[in-house]
Amino acid sequence: PRQMTKPKAKRWDHRLNTEAHSRTGNSLKQAARFLSTPGIISLGGGLPSSQFFPFDSLSIKVPAPGHFSESETYESGVTLHAGKHDLATDASIFDIATAFNYGQGTGSAQLLRFVTEHTEMCHDPPYGDWNCNLSIGSTSALDMAFRMFTQRGDVILSEEYTFVTAVETAAPMGVKVVGVKMDSEGLLPSALDEILSSWDENVRGAKKPFLLYTVPSGQNPTGATQGAERRRSIYKLAQKHDLYIIEDEPYYFLQMQPYTGAHQPPAPLPTSHAEFLASLVPSLLSMDTDGRVLRLDSFSKVLSPGARVGWITASNEVVEKYRMHADVSTQSPSGPMQLILFKLLEEHWGHGGYLDWLLHVRVEYTRRRDVILAACERYLPTSIVSWEPPMAGMFHWLRVNWRLHPSAGTKSITEIEEEIFMNNIENGTLLMRGSWFYADRDAEHDTMFFRATYAAAPFDKIEEGIRRFGESLRKSFKLEE
Ligand code: PMP
Ligand code: PLP
């Protein structure tokens, strides 16, 4: 009912593959709907009785709202309890007996409601029949999405440098990824249009691509964030070429404060939840009048990667196919984890408290980003390395002008990259090689990058790591400075 006035999503039957079309769901799970029949005695579903779950209660200590640091949580954190039969005693709407038993492919109704409300607050999709479904993280959701849309021989488009797991997920399905040129705002609409407009099946040996996999915020590995205008252009092109978009956004809430440089005062923090949400670049989902976006969200980067909980948002048609697949493979996320997240998000923090937490994470990442940028300015030879300040995510992407390398005339770009990488390891730091992230390893590449993350190392280690990287670059390039 909340969506009555909005238009309906387009149908995607022409994009879903035979496997997705063949899915009819898990017939055993469908019987669950009869359980709401008043007075029914279920001798139906093969669910074990909770009396055989050797778990009576669960306690987790978490931050009090607004007191988010590790030390504050240690000293004054709040302990949340979940009991086995909290539903029967009206203590909660979720308990161990329920959460630890079998559930539906949608994930638990309790946690699903929270993420659906959160999605409505953050993205308010402009069509009516959208829905969310819990996932066991975006890695799995992406694997399932590729299995819904692609067939052997298909080509997917993505950023030229991309999250390699996506390439490695697609490859065994017989699906190749073709990279689209990028700039500091990520995927270039002109390059996307050019590839699609000039696509020749006979030359390319594949049908014109119809699936775009993109990471719009703090892209892995480049750290690039598409601005609002960029996103609108990409969406328009998707309409023009009838692309279906997979929007993979694990770093959406790692959008940081604007970078003001070492000598300027920091930008003021958002003073309300509304201001915070307004400061975020609008998502493709928020522009999705056609229902052509499958958005992947994940708690991995903002709560815990080991939780293995995320969610997808798309039109009912697509969510339904996803859920039918989940019913026969992943089922729901782990019950104990769903219960833990429900306790924290719904019963303890609520939506406002969760947004406060996300703002806390934003502030912490901003500090880390500023530390790595200050170190780069201090220690890196700018005659050969250049960068843009990342606006989101956890990666700093450093461009190396390899043509200035003493062996540029005799060695390949790959050999030089390898040499710099190994020099750097010998010098005591690990940065990732840019070439590991090519969407298409067979294509020609003439740019060299290294990826550094500021997510985890202590500040002094970030600084020392960058100092060592500068030192090994000077050695490789035989620089005096
Ligand atoms: N295989 C068989 C034969 C089963 O009966 C069941 C549970 N009904 C399963 C697999 C599913 O097991 P799991 O809960 O570990 O996914
Ligand atoms: N997508 C991108 C672009 C990522 O960088 C990552 C994590 O590295 C993931 C997905 C994985 O997310 P999850 O932990 O939810 O599977």
Image (cartoon, grey):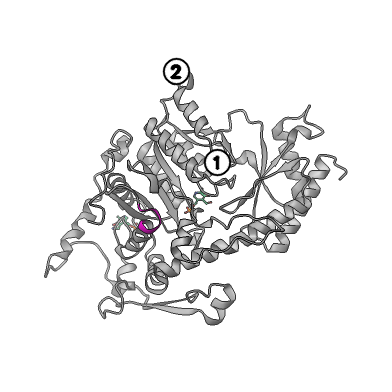
Question: In the image, is residue 121 part of the stretch drawn in magenta?
Answer: yes
Q: Which quarter of the image is occupied by the N terminus? A: bottom left
* Amino acid type, label 1: Gly
Q: For residue 368, what is the image quadrant?
A: bottom right
Crowd band around label 1 with a 10 angstrom C-alpha radius: few (<14), some (14–19), many (20+)? many
Q: Residue furthest left?
A: 39
Q: Which mark is residue 186?
A: 1
* Amino acid type, label 2: Asn
Q: Which mark is residue 202?
A: 2
Q: Which quarter of the image is occupied by the C terminus? A: top right
Q: Could you tell me what secondary structure mostly forms the magenta stretch? A: helix
Write the start and end of the magenta stretch as one range: 120-124
Question: What is the CA distance from the residue labelled 2 to the residue labelled 1?
Answer: 29 Å
Judge whether residue 161 can be spotted in this image.
Answer: yes
Viewer-nearest residue: 201 or 1? 1
Depth check, mark 2 against mark 1: the one in front is: 1
